[in-house]
Image (cartoon, coloured by chain):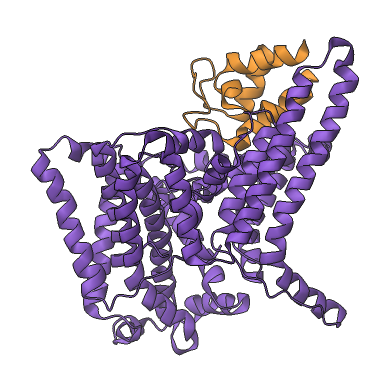
Amino acid sequence: MSFTSPAFFLFVLVLVPVYYLAPKRSQWIILLIASYAFYLFGSVKAVFYLVFTTITTYTAGLLLDRLNRRRAHLAPEEKTLGAKRIKRQKKAVIVCALLMSFGLLYLVKYWNFTAELLSGITGAAVPGLNLLVPLGLSFYLFQSVGYVIDIYRGKYEAQASLPRFALFVSFFPQIIQGPISRYDQLAPQLLARRSVNWDHLKYGIQLAMWGYFKKLIIAERIGVAANTVFADNSAYGGAVLAVGVLAYCIQLYCDFSGGIDITRGVAQMLGINLIENFRRPIFSQSLTEFWRRWHISLGGWLRDYLFFSLSLSKPFARLGKWARKHIPGKAGKILATSLATFIVYFVIGVWHGANWRYIAFGFYNGLIITASLLLEDRFIRLRQIFRMSDHPGWRLFRMGRTALLVFIGRYITRAPRLLVGVDMLWRTVFDCRISQLWDGSLLTLGITGFDYGVVLSGVAVLLLAEYQQEKGVAIRDTLARKNPLLQWLAIAIPMAVILLFGIVIRSYVPAQFIYAQY
Amino acid sequence: MDQLMKILSECCPGVDFEQEQNLVDDGIITSLDIVTIVSEIMEVFDIEISVDDLMPEHFNSTQAMFRLIEEKRA
């Protein structure tokens, strides 16, 4: 069920009153039923993966929790030997849980790529698997695995009730494209007993509408131009190719962050605050900062469960010791952590799918960020020599430089094949044909001049709002201080704009979200 | 404490480690800084800090880091 389908509007319209009118002790059950109904609506077969992930991570959580308790109650004379034995048992449990979870992910998302690779290398036909890729698998799987690792680390106790845990894994607004929540932040909210709160309702509607604005008015329109350019890239010169990639950058941001706004808005209507997934990435001063502001929940997950684990593991500790001894300066001190950083960015690339494009994208980000870490001291010295202080021009330059690096990366991920992406990038620089920008070529990309006008106006509104937020203005709080009529107008007018420009004028088709495929 | 201050100032020059009380929560130090600091601390103080110790409350201030070191030494 797409967030932009009439069925979804009806679903939310029915669910919200039912949730608040239901007896408080059974509100979480309503959410569980709604979540499974939502997922079943998309695909009955895909529910198998959801149930499998829920049961395996639930069981692993219980086993680890039991071992944590046993360790806490060890008699003093058993402390050393008993603790070692329990540590071994915990390791066995978590290794099994990780193998089962990531094994499933590997089979579904990565096996066919491996089979193709093996066939190419050995010459023998390695059979692929014709498995359904369930929507949102990477999201709910990462969320559940995060829970298991937290129990392993003794961060909190396991959830004893399977249905309650199932709600944490399947909560419908976030199951398709995140954000990847943490159990201790989300579960208490899902299980809380609530009365209707008009502020939550109002804020939720406003946020969801902001998401629909981004998705239906901007992303869906400009996405047509991006698709046209990438589908038939040989027909265009470099300048139009660059417009196509820029169109894709706008589409991707408005599609993903718009979807997350709808997710968080719907959750907020139910009184549940989901974590932020975007913090205005356009204002990033570096690629590292960009990844701290883009898909925050994935970055946070990889930081807590992969980066920290890798960096403090024994092999990395040994590498760190060796580097400190043999490589002078800061580079020696941070070599091991830089390698861990590189691995994290590589994983971010591969997380998107099994494809050379994503592998290259991971390398691209990993190499730039790792190099910038290792060369940081020299950059600082250069800045001092050229007296580049923190003035607005320098900040603007850094923003532009970061945007350019992200822009180049998008050639790789959106092109149908890696080499096509590289060729498009090459032609952008060396076969520009800049006259195509004004000879009418842009009007052959599937959207009209009017559409370009709508997109540009939409992007201007978006940038203005984000600039205000960046300065610390809380737009919805500011609006809440105005009189009630103005507040309702602030809902009604955007709703009319979305209906008119997002649905009525366009030949409307309920659209899927790009990140739902991951 | 002096040894710790030396590690911190070398790792993150320009940060006021004597005054700041929300180094992690306010994003003054990043995850990369934390890991670099932890690696240095383990090396200099010859202690073991595990991934389970990487909680914001242990790194929000110099005092908190010092408490963690003392705890691990005990």
**Residue visible at 81% across and 16% down in the picture:** A74
Colour chosen for chain B: orange
Using the image, determine if residue A357 lies above or below residue A69: below
Foreground pick, A512 / B44: A512
**Residue visible at 43% across and 42% down in the picture:** A274
Q: Residue furthest front?
A: A23
Foreground pick, A167 / A444: A167
Using the image, determine if residue A453 lies above or below residue B12: below
| Residue A367 showing in the rendered view | yes
Total marks shown come to 0
- List x then y, in percent, for residue A11: 35, 58
Colour chosen for chain A: purple
Left/right placement of residue A295 relative to residue A282 reads right
Foreground pick, A103 / A379: A103
**Residue visible at 71% across and 11% down in the picture:** B70
Which image quarter: residue A239? bottom left
Foreground pick, A489 / A340: A489
Left/right placement of residue A435 relative to residue A231 reads left
- List x then y, in percent, for residue A55: 66, 48
Q: Quadrant of the C terminus of chain B?
A: top right
- List x then y, in percent, for residue A417: 60, 77
Left/right placement of residue B11 relative to residue A485 reads right
- List x then y, in percent, for residue B48: 78, 24
